[in-house]
Image: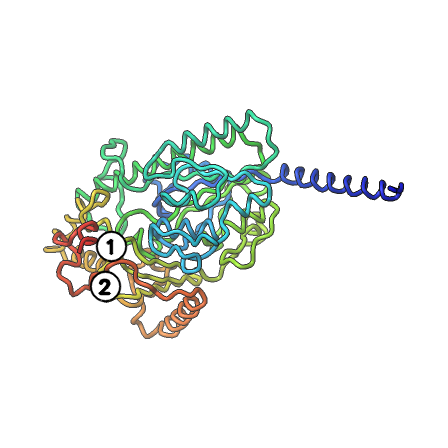
Amino acid sequence: MITGRCVFRSALCAFMVCLAAGNAVAAAAERPDIVVFLTDDQSQTDLTPYGGDEFRTPNMQQLAESGMTFTSAYVASPTCAPSRGALLTGLMPARNGAEPNHAKPRAEIKKWPAYFQELGYEVVAFGKVSHYRHTAGYGFDYFAYDTFHDHRGIAAAVEFLQERASRVTRRPLCLMVGSNWPHVPWPEKDSSYDPGKLPLPVTSVDTPETRQWRARYAAAVTKADDDLGTIRAAASSFLGRNVIFLFSGDNGTQWPFAKWNCYEAGVRVPLIVSWPDRVKPGARTDAVVSWVDYLPTLLEAAGGKPPRDIDGKSFLRVLRGKSSAHRKEVFTTHAGDGNWNIYPIRSLRIGGWKYIRNLRPDLAFTTHIDLAGNLGQRDYFSTWEEAAKTQPAAATTVTRYHARPAEELYHLETDAAEQKNLAADPRYSSRLKEMRRKVDKWMRSQGDTGRIYGEPRPLSDPDSFGPNAPSGDARRKK
């Protein structure tokens, strides 16, 4: 026999379940929509908000005027796949398993989509968000056009937003869009940039061919800016006001001493975040942040609880203007990129000091830039080698490109371009020892063994680099 008290309890339980479900739906509906836009191979200085006035990036500039610009944002690795693997797991490469380029995090590791799906989000990706051929393993609700230089992802993301706006949904959205620009191959012909007027990085050898290639890179940067403008306009049209828009780059440009290097040009990247009514327009911060921090930061902004077992930590207080500092130190790591680049590097920045450890200084540093290949820039690097035969400055640059000391120490406040290595200066021996010790301890804590991936070429090998060096494909056959 069912008593009145039992009926009442059953009804009360049903009511509480419905109320909880209703509250969950309401909470999800109140969460901000999130748009993450990523460029591919863009150093921090190569856009106007960071003083790169030679580049036409009006959309990036407008985003900076509406949000917060981070001057000290670092990737986990100066190479595409390890960098993006760290972003999507909140774990540094040695911990997630994606150390060399074209690797992916271990399958059992929880990844970005799962965290946001637990909060009720629809999580989708268009373009190069993880890495080519890897997106399927991340658990996105939907993804498309994640193959090499497939630019259809930008238009597809706009179409998705337009279609989504036409249907009734109370799920918040986490949209991730990856532009393929300014990754090589760069536009072959573009008259909008004058090669003679573009300044070159101080680590360059000034030749006509170098300037032509620099102009091609500048044109590719503007294409990335166009993509950002397209996505931002669509987000403004089809999403509400409560939208977090985060723009960053996965590593530095494919230029000597940038991508594949732990120098600042390789690991220091743009980061601009807008969030109407929460982030002060036109704000700038020197707070040091890492790509592993993006996941916990956006999770907390969405009302979630950042996990404690990852390397990343939320900088939401910085975004909200409640703190001016985040990390006291930031580490970066590089393993290699197939047989094009086998050169393990670790680095540490503390305040104005930068320490770099080249784990195998007996190896030749080579990349797609100096080796023959259809995606490289040997056309201009060969002119550096020719200039090095008669010009001491060019010879110094080419030698430094290929041969690195075991340790490098730079004072960034007086040497932003990292040109004067202070590692051998006895005045800084205590600082060198301190940073060396910190890197040793950090590598142990990460389980980082400094493993070599690929077939290294010793500096003693006369074919290690230069015009006679075999291409990556040829070296794989050896």
Residues packed near mark 1 inside 10 Å, few (<14), some (14 to 19) or many (20 plus):
many
- What mark, if any, has residue 339 been given in the picture? 1
Which of the 4 image quarters holds residue 32?
top right
Seen at 41% across and 46% down, the residue is 270
Assign the N terminus to one quadrant of the image. Answer: top right
Question: Vertically, is 117 above or below 236?
Answer: below
Seen at 50% across and 38% down, the residue is 141
Residues packed near mark 2 inside 10 Å, few (<14), some (14 to 19) or many (20 plus):
many
- What mark, if any, has residue 363 been given in the picture? 2
Q: Position of residue 149 (x, y in %)?
A: 32, 37
> Label 1 sits on what residue type?
Asn
Q: Residue 100 or 392: which is nearer the viewer?
A: 100
Q: Position of residue 294 (x, y in %)?
A: 49, 49
Residue at the extreme right: 4
Q: Compute the Cα span from label 1 to label 2.
A: 12 Å
Which of discs 1 and 2 lies nearer the camera? The answer is: 1
> Label 2 sits on what residue type?
Leu
Q: Secondary structure at mark 1?
A: loop
- The answer to whether residue 392 is left or right of residue 327 is left
- The answer to whether residue 18 is left or right of residue 255 is right
Which of the 4 image quarters holds residue 262?
bottom left
Q: Nearer the N terminus, badge 1 or badge 2?
A: 1
Question: Vertically, is 164 above or below 359?
Answer: above
**Residue 50 seen:** no
Q: Position of residue 11 (x, y in %)?
A: 81, 39
Residue at the extreme front: 1
How many discs appear?
A: 2
**Residue 253 seen:** yes
